[in-house]
Amino acid sequence: MATAEAGDIVQIAGLSKATVSDTICAPEVTTPIPTIMIDPPTVSMTFAPNDSPLQGRDGKKLTSQVIWDRLAKEMENNISIKAPRPARTPV
């Protein structure tokens, strides 16, 4: 199919930062489609350091920075994930 309309599901290559709220259209179109409100996430999770007696003994993702980097990468493409940037503590 060479054309798509609002509401159609399409796959586009070459746009690294396009999201569901962006209007992708012909260059001569200057008015974007109004953004639709998306429902907020329905599940809440807390990611915290492991403080159990077995902390740091198993697994490859042992630091909070590694976990944050993976979560941030997932948030680029998954609109259902929202997370505030954690506060950095001085070293």
Image (cartoon, grey):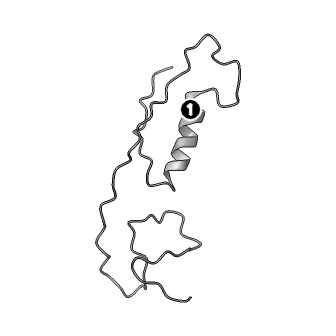
Is 44 displayed left or right of 34 in the figure? right
Q: Name the image quarter holding residue 58.
A: top right
At label 1, the amino acid type is Gln
Pinpoint residue 50: horizontal percent, then vertical percent. Answer: 56, 20
Quadrant in which the N terminus is drawn: bottom right
Pinpoint residue 76: horizontal percent, then vertical percent. Answer: 50, 53
Question: Residue drawn at (49%, 74%), measured in percent from left and top?
Answer: 9
Image height of 83 relative to 30, above or below:
above
Image height of 66 relative to 56, above or below:
below
Q: Name the image quarter holding residue 59.
A: top right
Q: Name the image quarter holding residue 53.
A: top right
Question: Residue drawn at (64%, 26%), measured in percent from left and top?
Answer: 62
Image height of 64 relative to 84, above or below:
above
Pinpoint residue 57: horizontal percent, then vertical percent. Answer: 70, 18
Q: Crowdedness of circle 1 by 10 Å Cα count: few (<14), some, many (20+)?
A: few
Question: Residue drawn at (32%, 76%), measured in percent from left and top?
Answer: 32
Image height of 75 relative to 12, above or below:
above
Question: Residue drawn at (55%, 15%), measured in percent from left and top?
Answer: 51
Residue nearest the viewer, comparing 32 with 37: 37
The residue wearing badge 1 is 65
